[in-house]
Amino acid sequence: MGLLVNSKTKQRIYLKSIHSMGRDAESCDTALYCPLCSRLQCVIRYQNSAWYLYDESRNGTYLNGAKLSAGGTRLKEGDSISFPGDQGNNWTLEDTSSPSSVLLFNGGEQYIELDKCNALPNERHPELLITREEDSFHWFIEQGELVKPLRGGDRLYFSGQPWVFYPNDMVLETQVYQIQDTKDDLHLFFGVSLNEENVQLVTSNRKIEKDMGYKVHHQLLVILARRLISDGNSGFPLRDSGWIATDLLLRELRIEAAYLNILIYRCRTAFERAGIKHPPIDRRQGELRLRPCRVSIQKGEDLVEHLPNIDGSIASPMCSGFG
């Protein structure tokens, strides 16, 4: 992501997609302490796959020693930005890559670039999960049984170190998206062995079928799928269907909360690798569910199916035997 480094203080600034600099520390992303600078001195904006510098001041902003003219000026790596009366204290653009959401440690000495689903510090020993909703770009932290929204500037801890969340959701304003139908035609088929020790998952999404094989985390999914079917049989509305308390899951799976986070992470990433844009795992404080979709569970000759209705209710499950 875009990076500015101060020539004197060596301060590192990771740029937001629209990043303001000026004397007004309350409203600007980066505060300037030069008396000749304006309250809003300049804006650095990411657009058309590049960074641009806009002067918004009375006394001018300098790029490589030359005073900027009106309009945006495209920046390149190594460019130096300075201000009137303080040109010896400049900022150098050391990275021109596109903006991204990160966790920063110790003011930027280290950073972790975030994906949609992140197990930290690593997948084998996750102390927490950080996830982002696909459509709304809302971020959430999941730690133990705690689930809460994550906002810019929030401090969180793992590996005994404090990290600061640095979002870049405004990047959406710099890109143009074609509106498309995002409705998933998702069908999950579970093949469960008679002793319940092996669970196969086959997904079908937009007529593309993928065998996900036999995985340990499929045990979690089939428990959630059975709760979804049970709630459907009870006539629950979609918004309330499928939820199961985390402590019940831990007891049924006979695992610790930390390992549950591993299973959730593996489920979500497996769905994404299978091309399923919206992994159907929902989580809220103390509860988890499989988002309502078509589900089939076959154990031996018994088949149970579940299909949500478009009117917001859930169709009754269908049971059949094959002989």
Image (cartoon, rainbow, N blue to C red):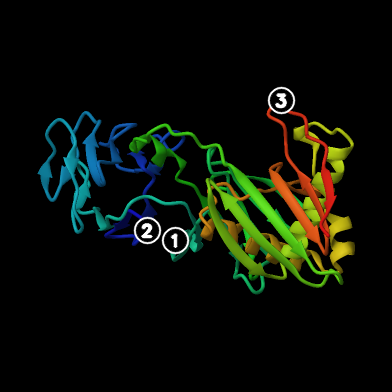
Q: Which label sits in the foreground, 3 or 1?
A: 3
Give the CA distance from mark 1 to mark 2. 8 Å
Tag 3–tag 1 contact (CB < 8 Å) = no
- Residue 46 visible? The answer is yes
Where residue 294 appears, as percent x and y from the top left, is 69, 44
Residue appearing at x 88%, y 63% in the figure: 252
Q: CA distance from mark 3 to mark 1?
A: 49 Å
- Who's the residue at 46% across and 63% down the image? 111
Q: To which residue does mark 3 refer? A: 311
Q: Mark 3 is on which residue type?
A: Asp
**Residue 315 percent coordinates (x, y):** 78, 35
The circle drawn on residue 249 is none
Q: Quadrant of the N terminus?
A: bottom left
Residue sitting at x 32%, y 53%? 2
Query: Quarter holding the C terminus?
Result: bottom right
Instruction: Give the labeled residue for mark 2.
Output: 11
Is 293 positioned to the left or the right of 78 in the image?
right
What residue is shown with label 1?
Answer: 108
How far apart are the two marked residues, 2 and 3, measured between alpha carbons?
55 Å
Report the residue that reaches farthest toward the front.
Answer: 323
Describe the element under mark 1 as helix, strand or loop.
helix
Looking at marks 1 and 2 on the same chain, the residue that comes earlier in the sequence is marked by: 2
Q: Position of residue 284 (x, y in %)?
A: 74, 45
Closest to the camera, between mark 1 and mark 2, is 1
Mark 1–mark 2 CB contact (< 8 Å): yes
